[in-house]
Image (cartoon, helix red, strand yellow):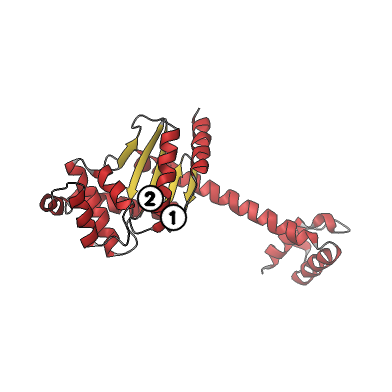
């Protein structure tokens, strides 16, 4: 720990010191003595210092996230190559990043459905983010290609309800079950917009600091992991109030 950092620590504990001191006048040894004496006299200051540090870190993280969200808001919510469900004219946008091989993504789908059923003004944006292996990539590409046959949502629901892992064989089985033309699907899976969607998802999640699925963005809130419908509903209301 540097002398300057120790000095700052000592000054933060100034309330426990018998007299005011200047950071520039303190030697490192003296700072250590003052800090040690303060801790001995009042051990609670350790917990207080940890709490303050956590609060400041959280504030810094929130500020950084807010700045990043402002920079990426357009791509998050208005990407013409994104997938928009729910109410396309809704006043609050909920963005979900997911992977078909993520069990928590499958579990959270009913929660998202409950949100949309509860609030008719939710605009739902899906971002395919295949990070769990080759099967996930194949599934994401197939889902994005299904848009060309106007069957994205039907295919997505079937994939989220499937048992076992999404691999080429199981993905194509689901595709046949929902009535997709497989030859056309395979061709459309190689379209540039499929690559672009997945690449944009990778860039957005990297920028926002997400490292797993599912992950949500609602207004200024970044929500990683599984979440219940009531939390989603609450966050939508927070975003709506902030916008108004």
Foreground pick, 203 / 98: 98
* Contact (Cβ within 8 Å) of mark 2 with mark 1: yes
Identify the residue under disc 2: 97
> Which structural element holds mark 1?
loop
Can residue 29 be seen? yes
Q: Quarter of the image holding residue 100? A: bottom left
The residue shown at (37%, 52%) is 98
**Compared to 244, does 2 lie above or below?**
below
Q: Quarter of the image holding residue 85? A: top left
Identify the residue under disc 1: 210
Foreground pick, 73 / 100: 100
Which quarter of the rendered picture does the N terminus lie within?
Answer: bottom right
On the rendered structure, is 173 left or right of 241?
A: left
Give whichever of discs 2 and 1 has the lower sequence position: 2
Q: Position of residue 168 (x, y in %)?
A: 22, 61
Which residue of the protein is positioned furthest toward the top in this rendering?
244
């Amino acid at each position: 720990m540097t002398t300057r950092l120790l000095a700052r620590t000592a000054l933060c504990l100034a309330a426990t010191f018998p007299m005011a001191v200047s950071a520039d006048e303190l030697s490192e040894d003296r700072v250590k003595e003052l800090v040690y004496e303060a801790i001995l006299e009042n051990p609670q200051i350790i917990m207080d210092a940890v709490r303050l540090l956590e609060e400041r870190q959280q504030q810094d993280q929130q500020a950084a996230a807010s700045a990043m969200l402002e920079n990426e808001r357009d791509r998050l919510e208005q990407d013409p190559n994104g997938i928009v469900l729910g109410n396309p004219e809704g006043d609050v946008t909920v963005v979900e990043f997911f992977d078909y091989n993520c069990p928590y993504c499958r579990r959270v789908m009913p929660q998202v459905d409950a949100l949309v059923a509860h609030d008719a003004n939710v605009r739902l944006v899906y971002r395919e983010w295949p990070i769990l292996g080759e099967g996930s990539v194949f599934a994401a590409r197939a889902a994005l290609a299904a848009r060309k046959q106007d069957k994205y949502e039907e295919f997505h629901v079937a994939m989220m309800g499937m048992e076992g892992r999404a691999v080429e064989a199981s993905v194509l089985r689901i595709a046949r079950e929902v009535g997709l033309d497989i030859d056309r699907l395979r061709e459309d899976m190689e379209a540039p917009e499929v690559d672009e969607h997945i690449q944009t998802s990778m860039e957005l999640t990297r920028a926002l600091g997400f490292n797993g699925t599912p992950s949500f963005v609602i207004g200024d809130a970044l929500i990683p992991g599984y979440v219940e419908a009531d939390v989603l509903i609450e966050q939508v209301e927070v975003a709506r109030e902030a916008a108004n």
